[in-house]
Image: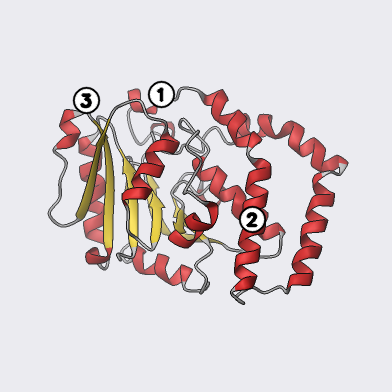
Amino acid sequence: MVNISLLLPTRGRPQLVSRLLDSLAETTTDLKNLEVILYVDEDDVESHMISDLRLAIVKLVRPPGEKMGEITCACYGASQGRYVMLMNDDAVFKTRGWDDRVVQAFAQFPDDIALVYGNDLDQGKAVPTFPIVSRTVCEVIGEICPKGYYNLHIESHLFDIFKQLSRLGHKRIVYLEDVVFEHMHYAVGKAVKDETYTKKNKQNDDILFISLNDERYHTAVKMVHDIEKLGKGLNDAHSTRASEKAYKRSKFSVKGILKRVFTPYYIMIFKRRSRNKL
């Protein structure tokens, strides 16, 4: 099994993918323990030719028009890595030895239940633009992400699971500020806007993200049980039950209800720039 799998959907951007692959080859310590799962559309013939002899690339050629959630799940299904990283084709790896740093971050948690992310030089700590989770996490969730997301909120979905896990007493989010995966996005003046940046069904993604709040909470609870079953957690079962009760009380408090009511506006105003994938 390789250490890290990069899930990389792309469409109409072979030059950007080439730049990304070059940066990977230049900054990765152990290329033998890295694979790139490249997802391209059947009608994107130019992207079919993408290759790099320095890297292990698994290419998926599928019909166009799939949802990003479906694409991400297909990439995950074709991957073998112990750790899985969601990646955009408009990113550039800037930190040498980034793969060692990622593995070291996960080594803090023998059960592999954690979310690790680096600095995209745009949103920084606020949003894990390129989240990295373990295969163990995906097995606990049952998938890497819901297939229903069209474009947005996949990274926010994962992030929120781990935020809820933190509220239950297990802090498993690791931000590597000095590990840079630069997001060369047009919104920050680092690229020219093209068709790929145009998002459809934004409102549907907002609604889906909100509707899955309870599911994310139950996933976090399941993670707590798995952590403690393996004896790797910091809390005992009694403290976990207490945390669950306290969290549920806060959920149905006036503050909790108001938060849920205004969540759609929070997402639209503050998280619209949490650009995940195409």
Looking at the image, residue 201 sits to the left or right of residue 80; the answer is: right
Marker disc for residue 220: 2
Q: Is residue 84 above or below residue 206?
A: below
Looking at the image, residue 172 sits to the left or right of residue 240; the answer is: left
Q: Nearer the viewer, mark 3 or mark 1?
A: 3
Q: Position of residue 217 (x, y in %)?
A: 67, 50
Q: How many marks?
A: 3
Q: Is residue 94 visible?
A: no
Q: Position of residue 255 (x, y in %)?
A: 83, 42
Query: Cα distance, mark 3 to mark 1?
Result: 18 Å
Q: Residue furthest bottom?
A: 231
Q: Which residue is mark 1?
A: 198
Query: Cα distance, mark 2 to mark 3?
Result: 39 Å
Q: Is residue 100 above or below residue 162?
A: below
Q: Is residue 166 visible?
A: yes
Marker disc for residue 43: 3
Amino acid type of the residue tagged 1 in the rendering: Thr
Q: Position of residue 6 (x, y in %)?
A: 33, 52
Q: First in sequence, mark 1 or 2: give its number.
A: 1
* Of the pair 82 and 257, the residue shown nearer to us: 82
Q: Are marks 1 and 2 in contact (CB under 8 Å)?
A: no
Q: Which residue occupies 71% across, 73% down?
A: 235
Q: How would you rate the neighbour count of disc 3 (Cα within 10 Å): few for under 14, some for 14-19, many for 20 or more?
A: some
Q: First in sequence, mark 3 or 1: give its number.
A: 3
Looking at the image, residue 21 sits to the left or right of residue 161; the answer is: left
